[in-house]
């Protein structure tokens, strides 16, 4: 492990707004912060928005700058990436941002029932290999996890460079009768694009430089349903969603 990484991990430990729990414990036990984010971390009752797979925290921080009356939590497993966002938060003295270092499959260990108002999923790995399908962050198993901590009828945003991920997610949502509020396979062709979607992270700039379209889905969760996958085998689903997706096939 590089010296810079070790230094960043150490500095993360000095930030009150960074939560770095023991990942081994997360397999067996809820974390003490579960259900207490407003009271313990933010010391207010403002809405909480979570960004899953936040990377360097660029989107989380940009959203927080624009909406000081909303609390934001960036979640990622890479501590060295989170450090960049955490450092920016400290330098700018932003009081409405926190970071959680964990695997997203353990997310239920950290958020309680009805604790979160909204989710952003930004540029997740589309997990094109069918044996890794359950690792897609809009797979039905993940959506069922989100249901357990989101408020009823909460909104979820998916912004991705992957047409496959966009189309796959849309199929899952339609299969489960979920209301899709917005859907675009290339957000930048819209002259009236919402400014919130024009926030460009390092990853987005990289993908755009390679000619990948930036897609967007916005949908409203439906309370008390059990999400399931569309009735295709994984290989068939993959082929359907990869049609006319040259950028995805080049990954």
Image (tube, helix red, strand yellow):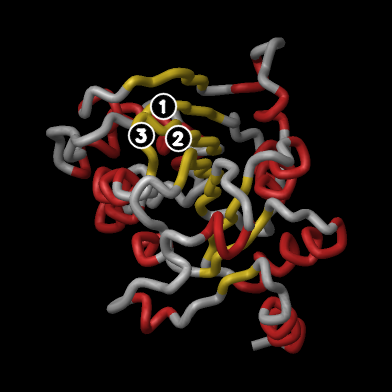
**In the picture, residue 132 is in which quadrant?**
bottom left
Q: Look at the numbered disc 1 and give the secondary structure of its residue.
A: strand
Relative height, residue 111 to residue 209 (above, below): below
Which element is circle 2 on?
Answer: strand
The quarter of the displayed image where residue 210 is located: top right
Query: Between disc 1 and disc 2, whose residue precedes?
Result: 2
Q: Give the residue number, with chain letter if any, for mark 2.
A: 156
* Location of residue 27 with respect to 164 vertically, above or below: below
- Please give the residue where the numbered disc 1 appears in the rendered image: 219
Q: Name the image quarter holding the N terminus.
A: bottom right
**Residue at left 70%, top 85%?**
10
User: How many numbered marks appear?
Assistant: 3
**Are the residues flagged by discs 1 and 2 in contact, CB closer than 8 Å?**
yes
Separation of marks 2 and 3 at Cα, in angstroms: 12 Å
Q: Residues within 10 Å of mark 3 (few under 14, many from 20)?
A: many
Q: Position of residue 47 (x, y in %)?
A: 55, 41
Q: Of the residues under marks 1 and 3, which one precedes in the sequence? A: 3
Horizontal relation, residue 99 to residue 155: left or right: right
Q: Residues within 10 Å of mark 2 (few under 14, many from 20)?
A: many
Where residue 137 appears, as percent x and y from the top left, is 39, 48
Task: Give the image location of residue 190, x and y in percent.
Answer: 65, 13
Instruction: Tell me how far mark 1 sits from mark 3, CA to CA.
Output: 10 Å
- Mark 2 and mark 3 lie on one chain; the one further toward the N terminus is 2
Q: Is residue 122 left or right of residue 196?
A: left
Q: Secondary structure at mark 3?
A: helix
Q: Residue at x 68, y 54 (%)?
A: 97
Residue that label 3 marks: 169
At horizontal 31% and vertical 77% (from top left) the residue drawn is 29
């Amino acid at each position: 492990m590089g010296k810079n990484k070790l230094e960043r991990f150490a500095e993360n430990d000095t930030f009150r707004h960074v939560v770095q729990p023991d990942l081994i414990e997360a397999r067996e036990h809820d974390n003490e912060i579960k259900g207490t984010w407003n009271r313990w971390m933010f010391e207010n009752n403002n809405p909480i928005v979570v960004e899953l797979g936040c990377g360097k925290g660029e989107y989380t921080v940009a959203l927080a700058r624009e909406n000081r009356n909303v609390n934001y939590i960036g979640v990622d497993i890479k501590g060295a990436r989170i450090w960049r966002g955490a450092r920016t938060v400290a330098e700018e003295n932003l009081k409405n941002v926190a970071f959680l270092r964990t695997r997203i499959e353990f997310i239920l260990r950290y958020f309680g029932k009805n604790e979160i108002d909204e989710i952003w999923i930004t540029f997740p790995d589309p997990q094109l290999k069918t044996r890794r399908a359950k690792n897609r962050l809009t797979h039905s198993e993940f959506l069922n996890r989100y249901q357990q901590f989101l408020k009823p009828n909460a909104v979820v945003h998916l912004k991705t460079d992957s047409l496959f991920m966009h189309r796959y997610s849309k199929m899952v949502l339609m299969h489960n009768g979920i209301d899709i509020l917005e859907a675009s396979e290339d957000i930048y062709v819209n002259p009236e694009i919402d400014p919130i979607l024009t926030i460009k992270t390092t990853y987005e700039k990289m993908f755009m430089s390679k000619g990948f379209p930036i897609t967007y889905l916005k949908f409203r969760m439906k309370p008390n349903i059990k999400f399931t996958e569309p009735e295709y085998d994984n290989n068939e689903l993959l082929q359907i969603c990869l049609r006319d997706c040259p950028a995805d096939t080049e990954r």
